[in-house]
Each structure stands twice: as C-alpha cells, then as structure tokens.
Image (tube, coloured by chain):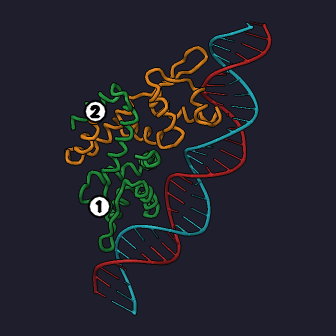
Chain colours: A orange, B green, C cyan, D red
Amino acid sequence: MEIDSSLAILAALGHPTRLDAFRLLVRHEPDGISTGQLVEASGLTQSTFSTHLAVLVKAGLVLPEKRGRQQIQRANIKALKDLMLFLAKDCCQGRPELCEPLVAELNCC
Amino acid sequence: MEIDSSLAILAALGHPTRLDAFRLLVRHEPDGISTGQLVEASGLTQSTFSTHLAVLVKAGLVLPEKRGRQQIQRANIKALKDLMLFLAKDCCQGRPELCEPLVAELNCC
DNA sequence: AACACCTATCGCAAATTTCCGATGGATTCC
DNA sequence: GGAATCCATCGGAAATTTGCGATAGGTGTT
C-alpha cells in the first residue's frame, strides 16, 4: 500500500467522531447503515458529520451507495486490512523478530 | 487497548513528519537513534520537530532514553502491536469472516 | 569556571480543522 | 405538481495544529 493512502487512513481515523463512526459501520457489516443513522449516533449536526464522513470516504474507509433517497454507508474492511499490512510490513521488513508476537496474538481471533 | 490510546496513536501517525519519523525509528530497532539525527532526516527546524516528537512520545509510540547529553529515541513496537490488535478485534468481534483474510496475509511476514 | 553541544519549551504567526446554520439538489410521497 | 425527506455543499466563526526563531536547562569538554 502507498504511504499516502496509509497516511490518509491514519489521519481519518485519528479523530474521535470518525473513529466512532467507522467502528459503528464495522459492526454493521455487511448491511451498512444510512447517513442519517450515523448522524444521530454522532450527536453532531448533519452538516458537521457530513464533512467527517467525506473524510472517511476520501480515505477509502467507507463505501457509500445510493439507495432511494437514502445514502447507505459501508465500512471498507479491505482498506483497514491494507493499512494493517502496511504497518506490519514496515516493522517486519527483514526483521521477523519484531512482528512475530504481533501475528501470534492476531491469530487468536 | 483503550480506545483513547488507539485514538492518540492514530492521530500521532496521521501526519507525514511523524509517520516518517516513526518508520525511521522502526528501521533502527533496537538501537534507536538520537533526536538530532531525526531532526536532520525530517528537514524541519529542531524546535518544530521536537514538538512532533513529543506527540509520538505522548502517544506511547516512542520511548526516549537519556544517554549523555544526547537523547536516544526508540520505537515502541508494542504500542503498534496494541493498535493493530485493537483494530483487528474491532473487526472480528464475533465475526471471524471479516478478519480471516487479514490474518492470513499477515502470516506471510 | 568557561565553553560548546543537544534538546525542550516559550511566544507568536500562519495554516488547517472543526463546527454550525443556511441553502440547494435529488428523491419519494401525497 | 407540491410538500416532505435526505444529504452534500457553502460561508463564516472558533479552536487547534503547525511552523519558526529565540531562549533556557542540562551535559560533556577544556
């Protein structure tokens, strides 16, 4: 994964509102939920949350799809996976001793 | 891992200067490098970089240790591991189908 | 003691982010 | 067609972040 993409994902998730929204979307995979429900859950204004959502979409973490007059949002698990691969490979570049404990613990889920 | 810690790590890494610095530190594990070398690599002013470094340290991603009049910085791989566990567990919470491809690919390093 | 070196912190300006209300486009319902 | 719903975008204010030079503390050197 490109470093710029990783950077965008990290920055996008580095805000409480956006991290919360993304986690909510993950828990609603694979159905997704509407923007309105996300707004309600955030406790913010519709317009404010909309800009946060745009950041997530731009980073590729959220995939919107129109359904009627609603906008259904879905978490892009692949983007998260790519980020984790980027982080892990950065550690492990020829240095498996750094990553071994990481991968070991991940296997538990 | 607490959500607040994860948030701090994500925000800390969500800036090009700080992500670069952390990656450089990872590549210098386990010896670490001095703050001065990090400053030079960043191309920024010493004072400016110092504030970025403080963000990384506060997030627990970097562990400083005094050595003479230098300050040696080391990447905290455990913090990165904790973040990845947080992200992965968030996906996998009772939903292994989401994480399986992730863990599978991680095993390659 | 005096000096040089390394780094954290202060003060401050510029840039960016965050938040809101208001507006407008698109879609559905009556 | 007209009203209502859903959501993106605009304009602007407040807060935060980012960057710099200057300063100061702590450490080694002479």
> Residue under circle 1?
B33
Of the 4 image quadrants, the one containing the C terminus of chain B is top left
Q: Please tell me which residue is depicted at 42% across the width and 27% down the height of the picture.
A: A76
Measured as percent of width and height from the top left, residue B33 is found at: 29, 61
Give the residue type at disc 2: Val
Left or right: A95, with B13 as reference point:
left
Numbered badge on residue B103: 2
Q: Secondary structure at mark 2?
A: helix
- Left or right of A38: which side holds A107? left
Residue drawn at x 44%, y 59% as measured from the top left:
B54
Q: Position of residue B6 (x, y in %)?
A: 43, 46
Residue B72 in percent (x, y) is at: 31, 64
> Which residue is nearer to you in this view: B95 or A43?
B95
| Residue B43, picture quadrant | bottom left
What count of labels does the image hold?
2
Q: Disc 1 residue type?
A: Ile
Instruction: Give neighbour class at mark 1: few <14, some 14-19, many 20+ (Cα, 10 Å).
Output: some
Specify the quadrant of the image occupied by residue B45: bottom left
Nearest to the eye among marks 2 and 1: give it: 2
- Residue drawn at the location 30% of the way across and 70% of the way down: B67
Closest to the observer: A18 or B51?
A: A18
Taking the spot 30% from the left edge, 50% from the top edge, the residue there is B77
**How far is disc 2 from disc 1 in space, using C-alphas?**
31 Å
Q: Left or right: A19 with respect to C2?
A: right
- Circle 1 sits in a helix, a strand or a loop, which is it? strand
> Are callouts 2 and 1 both on one chain?
yes
